[in-house]
Amino acid sequence: MVEVRIEQKPAFVVSGQKTWISGQDNELFGRFWEAAHRDGLVDRLKALSADPAFSVTGAQVFGVSCVGADPTDRAFDFFIASECEPVDDLEAVHIPACTWAIFSNRGTLPMSLIEAEITAFAEWLPASVYRHAHAPELEVYPGRDDALVEFWLPVEPKY
């Protein structure tokens, strides 16, 4: 069951590698994550990441969907990143201070993440007092529970 909470978070910087997502093809995300594991990017980001206990996300590695310019445009740069200073061949992304609707779900990936996103967009957001803010969306994997995934939706009041 997807649970939601609202949290204020400060701005922070992430570094990682990106790929272009050209639409609603969820397979593109999976292939990028598989390559990142296979090629050592995930291990490298974990080694560079801030201590999750002191980070904004509480995760070592997570996904960043750069939809801030136009949240309705579902073609965007997607980063696999960590909270760390910019390094060599990694690209930095600024995540602004935001109010986040955080949708937590447990289960097997990628279905648990997809369920959280569907709940966010199809059920919760239309019925809430919020709209999508102009900031990236995050897929966060808190290290405290391997079965837990969080979808972070940046929000602002509708009025």
Image (spheres, rainbow, N blue to C red):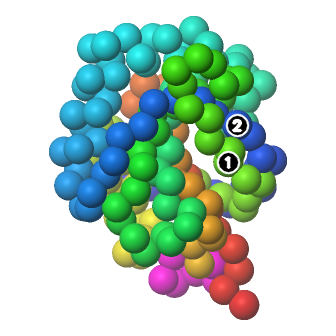
Magenta residues span 124-130
Label 1, secondary structure: give it: strand
Q: Residue at x 25, y 25 (%)?
A: 34
| Amino acid type shown at disc 2 | Val
- Most extreme residue toward the bottom is 159
Between 120 and 71, the one lying in front of the other is 71
Q: Report whether 55 appears left or right of 120.
A: right
Label 2: few (<14), some or many (≥20) within 10 Å? some
Q: Residue at x 50, y 54 (%)?
A: 66
Question: Disc 1 designates what residue?
Answer: 95
The answer to the question of whether label 2 and label 1 lie on touching residues, with beta carbons closer than 8 A, is: yes
- Image coordinates of residue 70 in percent, x first then y, are 50, 71
Q: Report whether 54 appears left or right of 128.
A: right
- Image coordinates of residue 97 in percent, x first then y, are 77, 54
- Image coordinates of residue 80 in percent, x first then y, are 45, 33
Q: Is residue 129 magenta?
A: yes
| Amino acid type shown at disc 1 | Ile
Label 1: few (<14), some or many (≥20) within 10 Å? some
Between 40 and 109, the one lying in front of the other is 40
Question: Disc 2 designates what residue?
Answer: 13
Q: Number of marks in the image? A: 2
